[in-house]
């Protein structure tokens, strides 16, 4: 148990701007502030809460208030003490500074089962300051109710800010329901690949095999990253009807040496291997990779093929090909 004096010292250390010289450069890692934040992240003593609340009433210093809200948030996260959320929500109604509000919202994002506070958080979704807006979206993480979901659906349906869309889509993966799915699918027409990737990730969590046509369409997207997310979705929710599209995608990937390492090939192979015994086209694909494309595989892909596909070691085959 930490004494009040020790808690004050911790808050002071969190405000320290001292840096450590390490490997010919200065870094914040292992500095007093860095260590204090790591200690604060582990706090579980709920008896500190009244003292911290009292400190908030007394101090006007912005940085100190931010540190107090950070500590309160971590105690609430580690103990699920509901009184913490009450203090944080009170702060939302009384604080005006951008950075303090952002800290409170970040702390609220880590709390759970705070559905009754969603209307207070939602007020900040229209804030002109993007950092506040995005922190408010994330703070709805613990508000698994219709009010919060409707607010997020409104964002993905109406906002033109790509980061609003990304944050809202991501939170819907935690608190969304079937009602959000049509609105998420509409976002797959967005020009930004990051938006589409986030949306597919959310559809993976909320959807099922009925969305397979959506994922197959995404597999044809121009962005390799969107294709990668689509492959993950097919691996989770696909069935035999996806086999031709996955084979086509894997063959396209293996046309030439790739510069960027990804899990896409292994993900596709993990999907196909389920049907390998009863599908000649899949067996032919594995044989084609084995006999003609082993030299374009990355190390992890070689290891996967050796483990799952056949007895001959691809590393030995590549070695023999290089010798010849």
Image (tube, rainbow, N blue to C red):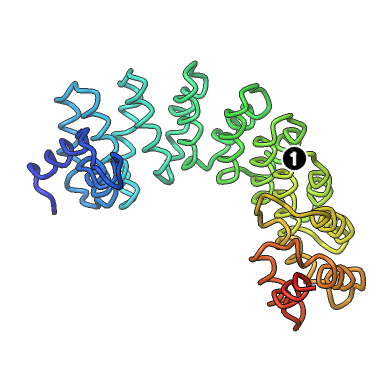
In-front residue for pair 58/251:
251
Asked if residue 260 is positioned above or below residue 277 in the image, the reply reads above
- Taking depth in this image into account, of 219 and 311 the one nearest to the observer is 311
Location of the N terminus (image quadrant): bottom left
The answer to which of 146 and 188 lies nearer the viewer is 188
Left or right? Give the position of 220 relative to 206. right
Residue with the most extreme top position: 128
Q: Which residue is mark 1?
A: 223
Q: Could you tell me which residue is drawn at 82 percent across and 68 percent down? A: 289
* Front in this rendered view, residue 106 or 13: 13
Give the answer, above or below, for where 225 lies relative to 168: below
Local SS, label 1: loop
- Could one spot residue 239 in this view of the protein? yes
Instruction: Inspect this view and state whether residue 75 appears.
Output: no
Look at the picture and state if 185 lies above or below 287: above
Q: Quadrant of the C terminus?
A: bottom right
Horizontally, residue 115 falls left or right of residue 48, namely right
Residue furthest to the bottom in view is 311
Residue 92 vertical placement versus 24 (above, below) = above
Residue 162 is situated, as x and y percent measured from the top left of the image, at: 62, 27
Residue 163: x %, y % from top left: 58, 29
Residue 299 image offset from top left, x and y in percent: 65, 65
The quadrant in which residue 120 appears is top left
- For the point 72% across and 43% down, the residue is 226
Q: Residues within 10 Å of mark 1 (few under 14, many from 20)?
A: some
Instruction: Tell which residue pokes out farthest to the front in this image.
Output: 324
Count how many numbered circles sit on residues in the image.
1
Name the residue at 22% across, 43% down: 31
Residue at 31% x, 46% y: name it: 76
In the rendered image, residue 316, in percent from the top left (x then y), is placed at 71, 78
Rendering quarter of residue 284: bottom right
């Amino acid at each position: 148990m930490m004494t009040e004096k020790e808690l004050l010292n911790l808050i002071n250390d969190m405000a320290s701007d001292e840096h450590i010289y390490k490997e010919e450069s200065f870094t914040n890692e292992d500095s007093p502030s860095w260590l204090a934040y790591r200690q604060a992240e582990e706090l579980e003593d709920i008896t500190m809460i009244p003292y911290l609340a009292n400190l908030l009433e007394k101090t006007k210093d912005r940085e100190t208030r931010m540190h107090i809200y950070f500590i309160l948030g971590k105690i609430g996260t580690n103990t699920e003490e509901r009184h913490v959320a009450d203090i944080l929500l009170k702060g939302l109604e009384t604080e005006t500074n951008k950075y303090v509000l952002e800290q409170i919202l970040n702390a609220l994002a880590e709390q759970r089962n705070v559905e009754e506070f969603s209307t207070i958080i939602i007020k900040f979704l229209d804030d002109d300051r993007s950092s506040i807006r995005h922190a408010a979206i994330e703070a709805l993480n613990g508000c698994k109710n219709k009010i919060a979901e409707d607010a997020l659906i409104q964002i993905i349906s109406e906002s033109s800010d790509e980061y609003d869309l990304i944050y809202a889509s991501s939170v819907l993966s935690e608190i969304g329901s079937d009602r959000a799915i049509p609105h998420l699918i509409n976002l797959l027409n967005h020009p930004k690949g990051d938006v589409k990737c986030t949306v597919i990730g959310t559809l993976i969590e909320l959807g099922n095999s009925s969305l397979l046509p959506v994922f197959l369409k995404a597999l044809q997207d121009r962005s390799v990253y969107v294709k990668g997310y689509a492959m993950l979705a097919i691996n989770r929710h696909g069935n035999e009807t996806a086999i031709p599209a996955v084979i086509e995608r894997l063959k396209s990937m293996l046309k030439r040496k790739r510069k960027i390492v990804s899990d896409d090939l292994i993900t596709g192979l993990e999907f196909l291997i389920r049907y390998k015994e009863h599908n000649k086209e899949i067996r032919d694909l594995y044989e084609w990779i084995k006999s003609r494309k082993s030299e374009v595989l990355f190390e992890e892909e070689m290891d996967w093929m050796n483990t799952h596909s056949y007895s001959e070691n691809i590393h030995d085959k590549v070695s023999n090909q290089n010798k010849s």
